[in-house]
Image (cartoon, helix red, strand yellow):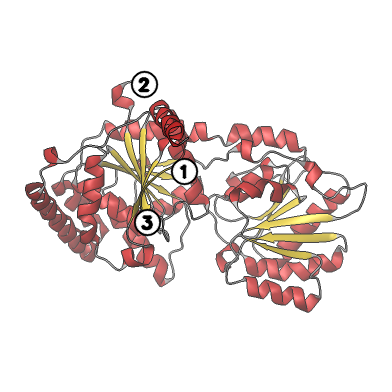
Amino acid sequence: MNSFNRHRICMVSDFFYPLIGGVENHIYQLSQCLIDRDHKVIVITHAYNDRVGVRYMTNGLKVNKSELSIERFRQRSSLSTIPLIRSILLRERITIVHGHSSFSTLAHETMHHAKTLGIRTVFTDHSLFGFADLSSVLTNKVLQVSLADCHHIICVSHTCKENTMLRANLNSSKVSVIPNAVDASAFTPDTSLRPSSIVSDEIVIIVASRLVYRKGIDLLIGILPKILRKYPTVKFRIAGNGPKEIDIREVIEREGTEDRVALEGPVHHDQMRNFLNSGHIFLNTSLTEAFCMAIVEAAACGLLVVSTQVGGIPEVLPSENTQSDIMILCEATIDDVFDGLCHAVDRIQLGQIPDADHWHKKIKTWYSWRYVTENTEVVYNHIMTKEQINLKERIERYKQCGFVSSFIMSFVAILSYLIFLFLDYLQPRHLIDQCCEYSKEDFEKKLYECSNDSI
């Protein structure tokens, strides 16, 4: 890889380990693959409990955890974060700042400061939003002004792309679709963990989701009693927690099905493979999804998937409702999800079980992190050929966001620019110590030396 194509990338988001979720896993896996391809990658996120300062993860991935928690960070002004973010970006000689998630305040702030420094920015949107309620209107306006001067945007599905373009008023040439991926080696099928059809007729339905309204838990609550009454041999295993957990427990107690519905609580990522393999069917009842990683992981383990037909989910797996397909799509209603789940249970009872090894190989081919990384590199290389966006051009782009938003963002951009000039006077860039750069091999060598010294 030549020097022009080697990038120094800063991944930034409010959501990163030790939190568990799709965005957190995406940032980690993409960072690891970019490091393997000889790029320098760091992560900026928030402090979590006692996890403060600089931490190192696998392959020397450097994680900068702000001394502020998420709650305290959000109480501060965006301008007050300039010295810290400026110091990190300059010390690490960052060439690209890659923000993740529309919900992340830290991502939008860091991207804004990076633009003032002349650093190119990329943003990945992982979610779908509506347009009607007040919270969506405010979030969409923040997204519009944040992406007005962003160099490129990545979406995880075509549905997500259309949604983001409408919300932020973007040109299609500025937005690319790069789907999520799954580490297939971590989700290998093992049918021996399922109840044996020889010993019993038991069928296990797996649910793994945050127990919140957006994940369609009300649909799950509506179909639970109906399925358990119709199929005496069906059991549920539900992973996750959230405010809707109380409602599920009420249904279980009312129906007297404590022995057939197990609430497992949060299941750690390294235990998810065994959890998925313990079932025959995976149920997803989401009301909105840009790209549901859980159904890809379930399919990689060979489970028959029943899912609501919302957002980008129809793009994820083939679903012609034939005996060879692995996903059954339903409308987001109790009756339709019930019918789809009944169809899945009937298929299992008839022995029409998906070929786990066959589908694992397909998922491994379709959703590889190597593919995601190579396409992300294409985006990085493309934006590096573009000219930097100066302050005048940024203000011109803000004018497309409406009079009030344009005035506020132009004022903030000018004020940020003046603060950066003042900081350049107090602490000139050429006097800032630059961090040492280690390749993956150098990091492993130093790690080995440190372990020998400790012995």
Residue 319: numbered disc = none
- Which is nearer the eye, 237 or 265? 265
* Residue designated by label 3: 46
Residue 28: numbered disc = 1
Q: Secondary structure at mark 2?
A: loop
Residue at 22% x, 37% y: name it. 434
Any part of residue 324 in sight: yes
Q: Position of residue 387 (x, y in %)?
A: 21, 35
Which badge, 2 or 1, is on the more N-terminal residue? 2
- Which is nearer the eye, 234 or 36? 36
37 relative to 405, above or below = above
33 relative to 18, above or below = above
Amino acid at the residue labelled 3: His
Q: Is residue 194 left or right of residue 273?
A: right
User: CA gap, disc 2 to disc 1?
Assistant: 22 Å
User: CA gap, disc 3 to disc 1?
Assistant: 15 Å
Q: Position of residue 444 (x, y in %)?
A: 44, 30
